[in-house]
Image (tube, grey):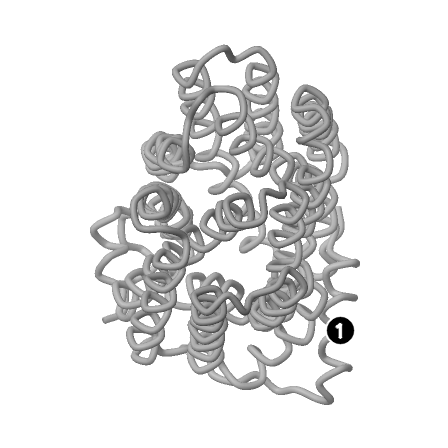
Amino acid sequence: MSISTEIRPSYRALLEVDGLPRLVGSMLLARTANAMVSLALVLFALERYQSPALAGLVTFLSIFPGLLVSPIAGALLDRHGRTRLMVLDYLVAATTLALIVVLGATNGLTEPLLLIIVTVQSLTFPLSTTGARTLFPLLVPRPLWERANAIDSNGYVVSSIFGPAVAGALVATVGSLFTLGLTSALYLVAAAVTLGVRDPLGVVPHGRLLADAWAGLVYVARNATLRGLALSISTSNIAGGLFYIGLPVLVLSRLGGGPAEVGQLFALSGVTAAVSVLFIGRIGTEGRERQLLGGAMLIVGVGYTALIVSPSLLAVALVMVLIGVATGPFDVVLFTLRQRRTDPAWLGRAFAVSMSLNFVGFPVGSALGGALAPLSLEATFVIALALNVVAAVIAFVAIPATHDEQTGLR
């Protein structure tokens, strides 16, 4: 079914777009699996090896190597379409997690081997994350983009509600290996659902693989908006990585909580974010992107500040609500602004590079958090606060207020 660009924007009209429900279904399954495995691996490292440093390194290596090869992933997506490559990534994730479970159950999983396995898993990660993200603007008419991005963002939000809560509860009751095994099965289901998703753009003209990958890097470097987002969002995500390791250490070591409470706190932030995202998706963001994005970063910074003096799990829960509120403007503005200012023919290459540059701060922050949190939680959260303030300033300074469709410059 096609939707006229003159139709009045609504969530009902969005869900009538041909192919979108299947894409949303596969996206929710995969992202829930992503959220589960991220927390389960952290808790696994803390439980089995009693090492925050290893937990941070596992998080780093499960993401960062994939970011390095993302320009090649973007070129592959534009060459060969998205669906098959998304399925490939889900199968790789399912296989590597199953290997961790088998080796862990037979006491054959050493720390170096764990790091090697999560590194291999990360290499195909950009295929699914970029593939799913670039299908939204291809399937959905432009007038529905804000609402589509609200649904896209809520895919992360819903997964952040159920993924950590389920992972934390399962780790607390039946152990981390069973949790990782269930996550492997979820990836297999996501792969099966994704097989029916179509790529309406097809395959764009291309040249040599490495030349196309390099062209994607150059396109992002010359696009002032994508360049400004990379500087701002990556800085904010370093803070997010510090927080992602610092929060479990705070709950487990100081506040008397367990894995279930860690998962519930992340889920609480997700519930609040779900409401915030749907609200922001109903309003126009064009012309107010920098204010909304910078303001969201400052709100999150306030939350990091409060964690420094939080005396109880209830106080931490209130902080998670505040962070969830800021998720709405942050996600919807980021997704929509990037779509508005990227040529559709460059979606795979440009989005792969842009998303990786934006997210590169998270694994870096996680690795730093693993080293810093055991020494000083206060320093961990203070640095996270400072980075978010810097990121907000960069958003105002480096992201253009307007866009030249031909050059990507002011």
Q: Is residue 116 left or right of residue 307?
A: right
Q: Position of residue 17 (x, y in %)?
A: 27, 64
Residue 146 in sight: no
Q: Position of residue 227 (x, y in %)?
A: 74, 50
Q: Nearer the viewer, residue 309 or 154?
A: 309
The residue located at (60%, 16%) in the rendering is: 308
Q: Residues within 10 Å of mark 1 (few under 14, many from 20)?
A: some
Q: Is residue 15 left or right of residue 222?
A: left
Quadrant containing the N terminus in the rendered view: bottom left
The residue located at (72%, 79%) in the rendering is: 212
User: Where is 196 relative to 144, above or below?
Assistant: below
In the picture of the structure, the residue carrying the numbered disc 1 is: 215
What secondary structure is found at the residue carrying circle 1? Answer: helix
Residue 374 in sight: yes
Q: Position of residue 218 (x, y in %)?
A: 79, 66
Residue 328 quadrant: top left
Q: Is residue 300 left or right of residue 272?
A: right
The residue located at (32%, 48%) in the rendering is: 170
The residue located at (31%, 55%) in the rendering is: 6
Residue 191 quadrant: bottom left
Q: Nearer the viewer, residue 41 or 399?
A: 41
Q: Position of residue 293 (x, y in %)?
A: 58, 33
Residue closest to the far front: 107
Q: Callout 1, which amino acid?
A: Ala
Q: Nearer the viewer, residue 289 or 108?
A: 108
